[in-house]
Image: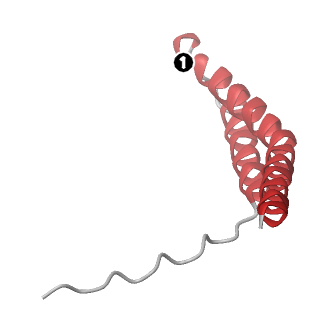
Amino acid sequence: MTRRRRPDPPPMETNDVRIAAVGTVGWAIALAVLLLLDLPAEDRWWLWVCVTGIAIGLFATWYIPRLQAGRARVEAERAAGRHEHS
């Protein structure tokens, strides 16, 4: 007996900039906590992990809207191209 496969659900809409911003805030909080602690010298590299997380998060909040706009533009061009060929 073969069952027909149900169609895939549509992609879930998410606010990717907000997700990146929350992650960035999380790294900033972690950095603040580590700065308040008296870390031994051999564990100070954790500070740079937090700084790197903050930097990547800031880049993501800048880049994600540009990425999504580019993808939307390409999709609109594809849709316009399909209508021209029809």
| Amino acid type, callout 1 | Asp
**Residue beneath the point at 82% across and 37% down:** 58
Res 32 → quadrant: top right
Kind of element beneath mark 1:
helix
- x and y, in percent, of residue 14 in the image: 70, 66
Q: Is residue 27 left or right of residue 64?
A: left
**Residue beneath the point at 87% across and 41% down:** 62
Res 85 → quadrant: bottom right
- x and y, in percent, of residue 2 in the image: 18, 85
Q: Quadrant of the N terminus?
A: bottom left
Which residue was labeled with disc 1?
Answer: 43
Colour mapping? secondary structure
Residues 69 and 35: in front is 69
**Residue beneath the point at 75% across and 44% down:** 24
How busy is the neighbourhood of tag 1: few (under 14 within 10 Å), some, or many (20 plus)? few
Looking at the picture, does residue 27 appear above or below residue 51?
below
- x and y, in percent, of residue 19 in the image: 71, 56
Q: How many marks?
A: 1
Q: Is residue 77 left or right of residue 57?
A: right
For the view shown, which residue lies furthest in the top direction?
A: 41
For the view shown, which residue lies furthest in the left direction?
A: 1
**Residue beneath the point at 58% across and 11% down:** 41
Residues 55 and 2: in front is 2
Q: Is residue 32 left or right of residue 5?
A: right
Q: Quadrant of the C terminus?
A: bottom right
